[in-house]
Image (tube, coloured by chain):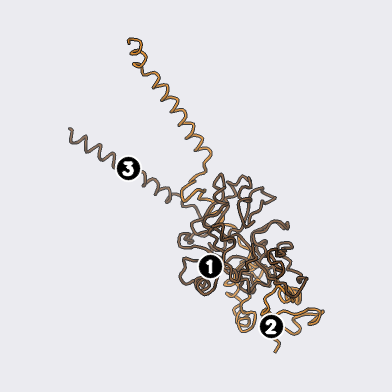
Chain colours: A brown, B orange
Amino acid sequence: MDQSRRAFLAGGTRLLVLSVPAAAAWDYVARGEASAAPDYQAASHWWAFTVDIDRCIGCGKCVRACKAENDVPAEPHTFRTWIERYAVDPLDPEHPRVESPNGGADGFADVAGSADVKTFFVPKLCNHCVDSPCVQVCPVGATFDSPDGVVLVDQQRCLGCRYCVQACPYGCRYIDPRTHTVDKCTLCYHRIARGLTTACCEVCPTAARVLGDLKDPKDPIHAFLRENRVLVLKPNLATGSKNYYKGLDGAVR
Amino acid sequence: MSHMGRRFSGHRHLIRMAILFGIGTGSFLVARAAFMPEGFGLYGHYRPGALDENRSRPTRYAGQRACLECHADVGETRAAGAHAGVSCESCHGPLARHAADAPESKATIPGPRAVCLDCHTANRSKPRTFPQVVVEEHAPEGDCTACHRAHQPKVS
């Protein structure tokens, strides 16, 4: 009698302890909703982005393609990617002149001023930081890091509180005037999950912008990072940016 | 001594506490079930369905591979010239619909001049090695394609 009760209790405890992870595992299995990219394995990718400043010609194709691909409002203050043009006067290097007319979507007029002014283009987009300030401040978990290293927005969860807009040190977020929720570069998540590159990389005529997968040993990004001296924007903020710039000037903020 | 004993002998205050605690826990669980979306926290501090929503948007640009499936000949012509690294949709624009149902949806043929100037207009901010022309001197008007073939631009 005593023996059987003990056995019953032990068995019951074991069942109880095992049922917790089993229930959790079942949750994963049961959540098999139809996916647009059923073969995409997020855990086997880690996306990063490279920009070669020495190749960017400021044509604005990336900005226009991004707006077309992602249905970004035409307003001149909503951009997922944009191009800045820097003009650094050697007599006043601390105060570079930075312009981005319509985000660079229509290209740039030639720069005025002395021939000694150093001038170049800097394409910008979300840096898909590993330790993103925007993810940390979101009060409802609407901005999050995907398992493959992309910072995404849950449009259903977003309250439009704008904390993340203020938190992003790179100015990569905007409030969509139609939905009043935040939006940003998704690294064309709908494209990369289907095995395509981002729209901006697709149209870049000089391959100044290239998407890379750090978990793919055959990806050319490894050679790019190994053979070039690269920098991220605002490294002092320790955001863990994954946009690597080659040829970035010290004047760039 | 006797009144002290009576004060601590009853269990009613414990039961009252338990009921209060139960109500608190219950309302927390009900509120949590009502406000937390399904699966929240499964992979991280977010709703897992958002991953699929972000993935399932339609594409506008078909991508290089889709173009070359039908237009391999143009791809070969281009590969032999200076525009080898320029993708089709860089000049032709977004063509996902064309790739999905050609020939009903026609591809766009860019104009013979404006699309060239997008890249090749001289600008001091461009890298010096990039081929660029002062348009007013090089060709103030007319079609660029009169001399340069778009897919193999070098004049031969």
Q: CA distance from mark 2 to mark 1?
A: 29 Å
Residue beneath label 3, please?
A: A17
> Are tags 3 and 2 found on a single chain?
no
Q: Amino acid at mark 2?
A: Pro
* Label pair 2/1, CB-CB below 8 angstroms: no
Nearer the camera: disc 3 or disc 1: 1
Q: Residue A24 location, x and y as percent?
A: 40, 47
Q: Residue at x 73, y 68 (%)?
A: A107
Q: Residue A198 location, x and y as percent?
A: 59, 65
* Label 3 SS: helix
The disc, 3 or 1, on the residue closer to the chain's N-terminal end is 3
Q: Give whichever of A215, A169 is nearer the camera.
A: A169
Residue beneath label 1, please?
A: A212
Q: Residue A58 location, x and y as percent?
A: 69, 70
> Label 2 lies in what chain?
B
Nearer the camera: disc 2 or disc 1: 1
> Are tags 3 and 1 found on a single chain?
yes
Does A216 appear above or below B132? above
Q: CA distance from mark 3 to mark 2?
A: 71 Å
Residue beneath label 2, please?
A: B153
Q: Amino acid at mark 1?
A: Gly
Q: How many marks?
A: 3
Q: Give whichever of A241, A62 is nearer the camera.
A: A241
Label 3 packing within 10 angstroms: few (<14), some (14-19), many (20+): few
Furthest residue in direction front, as rendered:
A91
